[in-house]
Image (cartoon, grey):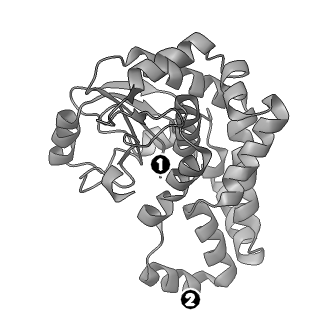
């Protein structure tokens, strides 16, 4: 997975999904689709690097409150697309934060269950379905080789992770590789040991376990989304077609745009 990492110094979890093989013997082109965390920390050098890398579209899945607090630094050659998966981030309200902090101290599973519910919402919420349809519209318009759509949320793992699952499924990447790419966020986002010890001593083991649930991805999170998708549409490909309204012809067009015979 390391070959997918972009050389961004001040951001995190920036990965090109190019190079992954498909079941029909092709591979995703490099410099066409990049997944990442938020763009707010980027330096001028990072932005220049993304311009040179070919980033021409910045799809921002974050809620308005996240966008306001940490606005994207958009590469100068890229178009910005405000594409919130969830229109309001109620979890950032003071009352909600106080309730969550209390729950996290008392119940070590609270964060885990919060995340499971978030993954159900990513599949079922009308705002999320609309956002991923817009995402596919941007992918379909990105027809020139060497020009990339960058799509991101805050950490680049959940809303972004599901966007990657949808796209890679349409392109024919095997399920086990899609899962491996999804889980690889853990290598780039894990709490370091010093921060773990600090949280443990300040807030207790239950709180630390909850923070780890929010800052990692797990098989159970992806499986929760996939189970809801199966209940709604049978499988991911059907969901993309029936719920996100990406037609069979558009899926064929995506393969023409994003796949190559030699992985370059």
- Residue at position x 72%, y 26% from top? 238
Work out which quarter of the rendered image holds the C terminus and state it: top left
**Residue 136 at x, y percent in the picture:** 52, 22
The answer to which image quadrant residue 169 occupies is top right
Q: Is residue 52 depicted above or below 39 in this figure? A: above
The picture places residue 184, in percent across and down from the top left corner, at 48, 59
Which of the two discs, 2 and 1, labels the residue nearer the N terminus?
Answer: 1
Residue 209, image quadrant: bottom right
| Callout 1 secondary element | loop
Task: Check whether the beta carbons of the residues at disc 2 and disc 1 lie within 8 A of each other.
Answer: no
Q: Residue at x 33, y 37 (%)?
A: 263
Nearer to me, 102 or 23: 23
Mark 2 surroundings: few (<14), some (14-19) or many (≥20) residues within 10 A: few
Outermost residue toward the top? 249
Rendered location of residue 92, percent (x, y): 60, 50
Residue 169 versus residue 163: which sits nearer the camera?
169
User: From mark 2 to mark 1, how far is it between C-alphas?
Assistant: 28 Å
Q: Is residue 16 visible?
A: yes
Q: Is residue 9 left or right of residue 58?
A: left
Res 208 quadrant in image: bottom right
Q: Is residue 98 left or right of residue 48?
A: right
Q: Which mark is residue 232?
A: none
Q: Which residue is mark 1?
A: 156
Q: Residues within 10 Å of mark 1 (few under 14, many from 20)?
A: many
Q: Tell me what residue is drawn at x 25 percent, y 27 percent.
A: 146
User: Is residue 236 left or right of 234 when viewed as pictured?
Assistant: left
Q: Is residue 38 above or below residue 172?
A: below
Q: Which residue is mark 2?
A: 201
Above or below, 38 against 55 in this view is: below
User: Mark 2 or mark 1: which is in front?
Assistant: 1
Q: Is residue 95 visible?
A: no
């Amino acid at each position: 997975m390391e070959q997918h990492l972009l050389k961004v110094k001040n951001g995190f979890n920036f990965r090109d999904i190019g190079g992954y093989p498909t079941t029909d013997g092709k591979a995703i082109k490099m410099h066409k689709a990049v997944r990442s965390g938020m763009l707010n920390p980027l330096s001028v050098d990072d932005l220049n690097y993304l311009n040179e890398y070919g980033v021409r579209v910045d799809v921002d899945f974050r809620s308005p409150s996240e966008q306001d607090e940490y606005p994207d630094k958009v590469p100068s050659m890229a178009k910005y697309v405000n594409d919130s998966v969830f229109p309001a981030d109620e979890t950032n309200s003071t009352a909600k934060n106080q309730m969550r902090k209390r729950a996290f101290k008392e119940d070590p599973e609270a964060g885990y269950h919060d995340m499971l519910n978030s993954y159900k919402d990513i599949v079922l919420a009308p705002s999320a379905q609309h956002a991923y349809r817009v995402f596919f519209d941007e992918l379909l318009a990105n027809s020139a080789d060497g020009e990339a759509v960058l799509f991101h949320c805050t950490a680049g793992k959940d809303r972004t992770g599901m966007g990657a699952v949808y796209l890679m499924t349409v392109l024919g990447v095997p399920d086990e590789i899609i899962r491996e790419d999804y889980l690889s966020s853990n290598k780039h986002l894990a709490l370091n040991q010093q921060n773990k010890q600090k949280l443990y001593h300040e807030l207790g083991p239950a709180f630390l376990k909850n923070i780890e649930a929010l800052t990692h991805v797990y098989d159970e999170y992806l499986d929760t989304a996939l189970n809801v998708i199966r209940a709604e549409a049978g499988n991911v490909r059907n969901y993309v077609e029936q719920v996100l309204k990406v037609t069979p012809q558009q899926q064929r067009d995506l393969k023409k745009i994003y796949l190559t015979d030699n992985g370059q």
